[in-house]
Amino acid sequence: CLANLKPPKNHITLLQAFIASRIYTRNWTLHLIGKDSNDAYSNDLKSVIKEKGMENSIFIYNACQDIKFVLSQATLGVLSSTYEGFPVTLLEYAEAKLAVVSTNAGYCKKLIHHTSNGLLFSPLDSDTLSNHLLYLINNPEICANFATQFQKDIKADYSKEAIIDNYLNLIS
C-alpha cells in the first residue's frame, strides 16, 4: 500500500481486512509505504500491529525513493482511502503490473472497472476488502488477468502518448 500515513488513507481498514483474512498464515505480508510523521495516527497503526502480534507480517516503511523496485516485489496493490482525488498510486500500481483492490472513493471508480481490471470496495468495509484479498490470492489466474488488463487500460487512457493525443485532438 503506497500512501502516506495519515487519516484519509484509511490504513486501519486495510489492517483489519488483512488480519481478518488470515492470509498471513499463508506467508503473505502487508507493506505500508509512505511518509510516517510518527504522530497519533501512525502510532495507533503500530499499536494495532503490536497488539495483534503481526510484527512479522505487517511492515511500515517511511517514504521510499525506489518505488519501482519495491512494487516489483509485490503481487497486489491496495488503496483504502476514505477520500481520494486523482489516485496517482493506482497509476504506479498499473505501471508495476499489479492486480489492484481499491476503495471506490473519488476518481478510483473511474479507473477500476470492478471485476474487469480490479476490485472495488466501500472505504470502511473491511469485510469486503478481506474477501477481495482472499479471492485474488485464491485465484492467481484472475489476479494476473486483472493486472494485465489494468495496465492496458491505464496505458490506453493515461500514458504520455494518450495524454498528448487527447490534447492535440482538443486543440485542433
Image (cartoon, rainbow, N blue to C red):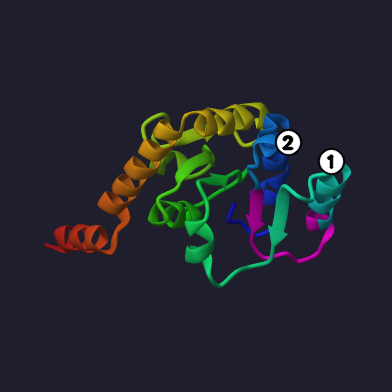
Report the residue at 76% width, 66% height from top: 37
Report the residue at 68% width, 46% height from top: 10
Give left or right: position of 36 versus 162. right
Q: Secondary structure at mark 2?
A: helix
Name above or below for residue 128 compared with residue 38.
Answer: above
Quarter of the image for the C terminus: give it.
Answer: bottom left
Q: Is residue 6 visible?
A: no
Q: Characterize the local packing of mark 1: few (<14), some (14-19) or many (20 or more) Cα atoms within 10 angstroms.
A: few
Task: Give the x, y percent position of residue 13.
Answer: 70, 39
Q: Which residue is mark 2?
A: 19
Marks 2 and 1 in Cβ contact (< 8 Å):
yes
Instruction: Please state the extent of the stretch shown in magenta in the rendering.
Output: 30-42
Q: Secondary structure at mark 1?
A: loop
Give, as a three-letter code, the residue at label 2: Ile
**N-terminal of the two: label 2 or label 1?**
2
Task: Give the x, y percent position of residue 166.
Answer: 21, 57
Q: CA separation, marks 2 and 1?
A: 8 Å
Which residue is farthest front?
26
Give, as a three-letter code, the residue at label 1: Lys
